[in-house]
Image (cartoon, grey):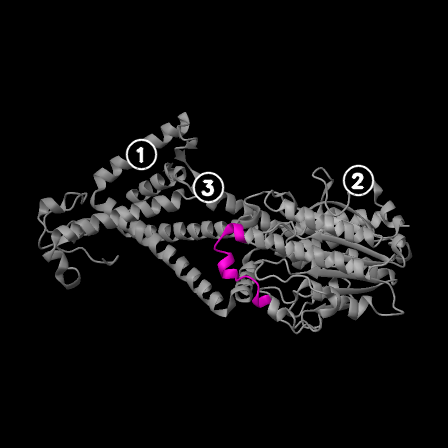
Amino acid sequence: MSLFTRSRQLPDTTGDEAQADGGGATGDEVTEETVEEARAQNDLVRPGWFGWRRRYPRAARGVSVGTSVLAGLLLLVVLLSPARLDRMDLGAFIRLPVEGIVLAAVLLMLPPKVRRIAAVFFGVFIGLLTLLKLMDMGFRQTLARPFDLVFDWIMLGNATDWLGESFGRTGEVLAIAGVIVLFLAVLVLCTLAVLRLTNVMSRHRPRAVLTTLVLGTVWVTCFNVGVQFGGVTFATNGYTGFFLNRVQNVRNGLGDAKVFEKQSAVDAFAATPPDQLLTGLHGKDVLFTFIESYGRVAIDDPAMAPEMDATLKKGDATLKAAGFASRSGWLRSPVTGAGSWMAHSTFLSGLWVKNQQRYLNLTNSDRATLTSYFQKTGDWRTVGIVPGVRKSWPEGKYFGLDHIYDSTHLGYKGPYFSWTPVPDQFSLEAFQKLEHGKKNRDPIMAEIILASSHNPWSPIAHTIDWNDLGDGSVFEQIKKEGTNPTEVWKSQERVRTEYRKAIQYSVDSLTQWMQRYGDENTVLVFLGDHQPVPTVTKGSTSMDVPVTIVAKDPKVLDRVDDWNWTDGLKPADDAPEWGMDKFRDRFMTAFAK
């Protein structure tokens, strides 16, 4: 009924019926609320579509009751559902939400016109919070953290790019369409559900008021007594807590820029003369190499440990045979699941870059990075091997790289491996040909990103004879023999297996390159950028990644003796754990004059 219908006589309603809940209407004079209730009471005799209500009154009543029940169940589910899938069990729904009781009380107190507008508002509001819960579920499954309303919108674009690159354009379009339909359905259904229950309460006002009072009393009593079923508190205000938590997160996010600006201004090496920087590495080629998603789970997880141990032991033997030694420890990454660029910038800048806004602020500042300090000395040619970059990357200048080789400049003519544009072995061979293998060159400082272990880990390459790499066409057959990501992701265990194989491939490629091309002037620092997605970590909250330094010159490792890192490529369980933002200053201190 229109919110602006004028008072009029109801021909099929007697005066007594009109006064049932009219609050003062008499005779032929009918108030707006009387009209609403009378029309609600006569709802079952409306003709409906093609007059079906009149022909099938029992079915009509059943549909009406069923719709009301479904509306109530829907609201109960959205109010009680947790914001993470690992807590989604029956116990989560055997609770009494105070928000539902308060909502009913507010709607019952409002006049009819305002009540309907309020019902729409509350329905949309509940729908939006439900969407936020769904976003949280998705982000927790991918990044092991909730969705950030201030900083994470850009991540949605990255997600669509990943879908297209991993599952093709069709998969990307279908996924986006499905998400849009889901979001619209949630908003519409939540709004309709609140409206439906509001109408039910309006035409059964006395019972609704009594029920609300009883439920309110039960909630207060159970809350004060602390009633629990199966360890779950029965009287809950979790929806309110969820909302207030997100409001506080937004407030913190909006103030984060000032906090980060103050942190950025503090740099222990800003005033150090260039000729006193990194003097302990003069004449050395220094390679900072990130292995995508190489997290602690690859080493600690019992299902992966045997194979990874074998790979790391083989790598140790390979390096020792070539005269190299190594030390390993742990770094705590600011991100998990994705967001590699934030981990890279944390490692290089010495600042905790935990969100996109910090990354943008950093790359638009004059804060020096580990790589830019190498450039500042004038003693190194600084280069970047970044096969994952397929578009313009203006941030490269900020990081102090004299030259950047992205996926289009490595000479690769082979196929993509899902998201990965260039297999790691080819990226390293390209670095050798383009920079490291040149004669009569200056020492090189290189930032190298190995991308083969990037999600979805299917299909993956495997190492071949280095002399057979050519222009990369050889990988066409290797890709055909690989797995299908759509099939792999139907099973968590298959995902975990392919992840482990991808990490093994990256480590093998790197240690073989060192054996083949490294010399007494080569210093390699390699590390993971973050843990993989929770599908692989199985809910582990650790954000640790392995970090290793490899060198043939014993004087290099002597300078890091006080780090107390573990000998070899595998850090011990009790090896030191630093925040990733601490590495820059520790490294520069160790290799200062």
Could you say whether the residue bearing mark 2 is in a helix, strand or loop? Answer: loop
Percent x, y for residue 559? 86, 46
Q: Is residue 45 magenta?
A: no
- Which residue is rendered at x = 25% and y = 48% of the image? 68
Mark 1 or mark 3: name the one nearer the start of the chain: 3
Indicate the position of residue 359 as horizontal and vertical percent values.
66, 57
Image position, residue 81 (x, y; %): 41, 44
- According to the picture, the residue beneath numbered tag 2 turns out to be 564
Query: Distance of mark 1 from mark 3, alpha carbons?
Result: 25 Å
Earlier residue among tags 1 and 2: 1
Q: What residue type is labelled 3?
A: Arg
Report the span colored magenta.
479-494
Q: Quadrant of residue 404?
A: bottom right
How crowded pointer 1 is (Cα within 10 Å; few <14, some 14-19, many 20+) is rated as: some
Amino acid marked by disc 2? Asn
Q: Quadrant of the N terminus?
A: bottom left
Which residue was labeled with disc 1?
Answer: 215
Nearest the viewer among 212 and 351 is 351
Question: How many numbered discs, if any?
Answer: 3
Is residue 480 located in the magenta-colored stretch of the structure? yes
- Closer to the eye: label 1 or 2: 2
In terms of depth relative to the viewer, which is nearer, 504 or 538?
Answer: 504
